[in-house]
Amino acid sequence: MSEIELRELLVALAASLFARGFSVGSAGNISARVADGYLMTPTNSSLGRLDAARISKLDPDFVHIGGDKPSKEVFMHRAFYQARPDAGAVVHLHSTMATAVACLPDVDPVNPIPPLTPYFVMRVGRTMPIVPYYRPGDPTMEPAIHVAARDARAVLLANHGPVVCGATLTDAVYAAEEIEEAAKLFLLLRGTSPRLLTAPQVDDLLTTFA
Ligand code: 13P
């Protein structure tokens, strides 16, 4: 896909997320790898109204080289790309249900959302660890995200929201949507004893859809 096509896809997918309430106001940011660096949503931009020509461009060292000023979470995206060479895109949202789970003090910090459905496992993997709270834009969170992302495609930032990568921009957006739906199911089922996918069922999904 050409960079122009990727810019247009980013605008369309972000607008779709915004239209369906996965982000509000200027919350959330999205990046995608290109041949000579990265595209990233500009800081304080609404995912509902991005302009393809003004999307920030960063060089391979994450230095801003074009477009509007990038997200203040550049380092969060960098942590994923550097921890996971397979990452082609990163999506960060403040989607309501996932953020609600990120506010619960009594969930498992390594695996806050259990394997309830196949698509959550297929898109996100075995684990989505919680990274402790940092102020949005605080660069000191980068090492914690880097360590967590070495073993996980997604992390949940405490009291803040999910961050997930994918091989492509579309994959990363699909994964962000599955995180929100899985969080919704988890909250709906809280206080009950739902049947979870078994370890062999999880293994089967991850080998079949690797
Ligand atoms: P930016 O507008 O700088 O991308 O920040 C939005 C956000 O979601 C912070 O976590």
Image (tube, rainbow, N blue to C red):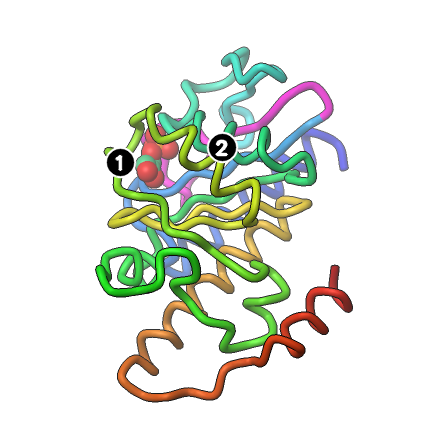
Other residues around mark 1 within 10 Å, as few (<14) / some (14–19) / many (≥20): some
Question: Disc 1 and disc 2: Cα gap in Å?
Answer: 15 Å
Magenta includes 182? no
Q: Is residue 197 above or below residue 100?
A: below
Which residue is pictured at 23% across the width and 57% down the height?
A: 103
Q: Which residues are magenta?
A: 35-51
- Residue at mark 1: 134
Depth check: give the residue in front, 156 or 55.
156
Depth check: give the residue in front, 11 or 39.
39
Q: Which mark is residue 86?
A: none
Q: Given the image, on which type of amino acid does mark 2 rest? A: His
Q: Percent from the top left, x then y, of residue 23?
A: 36, 51
Q: Percent from the top left, x then y, of residue 75?
A: 44, 26
Secondary structure beneath label 2: helix
**For residue 110, which quarter of the picture?**
bottom left
- Residue at mark 2: 77
Other residues around mark 2 within 10 Å, as few (<14) / some (14–19) / many (≥20): many
Q: Is residue 157 left or right of residue 56?
A: left
Whichever of labels 1 and 2 marks the residue nearer the N terminus, that label is 2
Magenta includes 46? yes
The quadrant of the picture occupied by the C terminus is: bottom right
